[in-house]
Image (tube, rainbow, N blue to C red):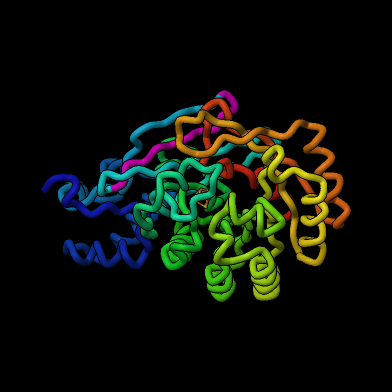
């Protein structure tokens, strides 16, 4: 049996591992042992599973692999940020990013939920590529496990802010969140789902009873600007989005993170700061301002200018009149362009409020 015909185990739930064990003629408790080796000990091979007999290990080797994803490329930034390019079983690729912060011991990972993206934000290379397909739950969970196996370190926070729009893949994203909570051992309060503003997806997520954080990538306070830079806005305009965020808070009690990318001359005008302050004044939220980071023009995304520090601070001062906590993003991994649409690590400063 070639490796591609074998069953990959990492990313499966406990029930699925038990079912697999039975399928290959092993008792159910072997599934529990596999679960422990994969999720608690980050086993990379069946030979490490020393409480299994040699015969059982050989049987497993003949029927299964541990990882579903393959690390096709890894870049490490000067600040310790690690960007992974994963090859999926069908040969397509997605990226994940691992971020370490000097001021706290815990690690955060940014995962992808789709191959490509249909939303088409003008500043985002993934949007330019277009939508290819949804990731399934196992493909999402194994991004985290691959990172833990490769780095040997435990991830404490997850953000769905890599490639793709998670709320256009709600079912798989919610399944993966449940597996992350039950198997990887990361609590809901350490998980953030970031959306470009899919109103039905926000409502669906609110119904799930998960205590996760919702991050709204707002990026512009008015429909005219937002229609251009986040084209899904034509379908779900700003007022509807803010209503959906209120509903999310009412259903979950979780404060929203409002993400706002500052593009010089496009979204950083003082009157836009005032409109943003008005929008968030009555919303239970924090605001995270993301100064645009110009990347190379050859990735297909439009290239904008980054506002000056003075303009960034002026903007923040105005938004602070809303009474909300307003932070400006901490830079991570810029030397390796560890970005999906500039948004990959924008939660870095805002997590403190959740
Ligand atoms: S920023 Fe996010 S939602 Fe927008 S195109 Fe890129 S991946 Fe899609």
Tell me if I can see residue 105 in this picture.
Answer: yes
Asked whether residue 191 appears in the rendered view, the answer is no
| Residue 344 relative to residue 168: left or right | right
Quarter holding residue 183: bottom left
Residue beneath the point at 16% across and 51% down: 5
Q: Position of residue 98 (x, y in %)?
A: 52, 39
Stretch of the chain drawn in magenta: 78-88
Image coordinates for residue 136, horizontal then vertical, percent: 36, 59
Q: With 316 as the anchor, is 265 left or right in this view?
A: left
Is residue 79 on the magenta stretch? yes
Report the front residue among 114 and 5: 114
Q: Residue shown at 54%/56% (left/top)?
A: 231
Q: Is residue 135 left or right of residue 233?
A: left
Q: Position of residue 332 (x, y in %)?
A: 61, 33
Residue 339 sits inside the magenta stretch: no
Q: Quadrant of residue 50?
A: top left
The residue lying furthest to the top in this view is 78
């Amino acid at each position: 049996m070639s490796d591609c015909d074998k069953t990959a185990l990492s990313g499966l739930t406990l029930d699925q591992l038990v079912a697999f064990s039975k399928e290959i003629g092993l008792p159910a408790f072997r599934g529990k042992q596999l679960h422990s080796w994969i999720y608690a000990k980050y086993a990379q091979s069946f030979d490490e599973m020393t409480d299994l007999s040699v015969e059982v290990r050989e049987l497993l080797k003949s029927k299964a692999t541990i990882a579903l994803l393959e690390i096709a490329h890894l870049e490490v930034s000067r600040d310790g940020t690690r960007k992974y390019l994963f090859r999926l079983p069908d040969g397509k690729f997605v990226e994940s990013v691992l971020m370490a912060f000097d001021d706290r011991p815990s690690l955060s990972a940014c995962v992808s939920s789709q191959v490509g993206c249909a939303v088409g934000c003008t500043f985002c290379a993934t949007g330019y590529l277009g939508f290819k397909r949804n990731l399934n739950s196992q493909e999402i969970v194994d991004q985290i496990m691959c990172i833990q196996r490769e780095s040997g370190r435990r991830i404490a926070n997850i953000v769905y802010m890599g490639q793709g729009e998670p709320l256009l893949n709600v079912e798989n994203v919610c399944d993966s969140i449940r597996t992350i909570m039950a198997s990887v051992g990361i609590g809901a309060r350490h998980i953030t789902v970031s959306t470009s503003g899919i109103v039905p997806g926000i409502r669906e997520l609110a119904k799930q009873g998960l205590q996760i954080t919702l991050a709204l990538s707002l990026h512009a306070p008015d429909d005219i600007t937002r229609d251009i830079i986040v084209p899904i806005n034509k379908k779900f305009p700003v007022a509807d989005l803010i209503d959906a965020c209120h509903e999310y808070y009412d259903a979950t009690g979780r404060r929203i993170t409002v993400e706002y990318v500052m593009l010089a001359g496009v979204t950083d005008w003082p009157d836009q700061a005032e409109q943003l302050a008005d929008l968030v004044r009555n919303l239970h939220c924090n605001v995270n301002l993301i100064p645009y980071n110009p990347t190379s023009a050859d990735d297909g995304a439009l290239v904008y200018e980054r506002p000056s520090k003075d303009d960034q601070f002026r903007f923040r001062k105005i938004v602070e009149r809303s009474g909300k906590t307003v932070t400006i993003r901490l830079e991570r991994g810029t030397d390796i362009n560890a970005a999906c649409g500039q948004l990959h690590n924008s939660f870095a400063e805002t997590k403190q409020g959740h």
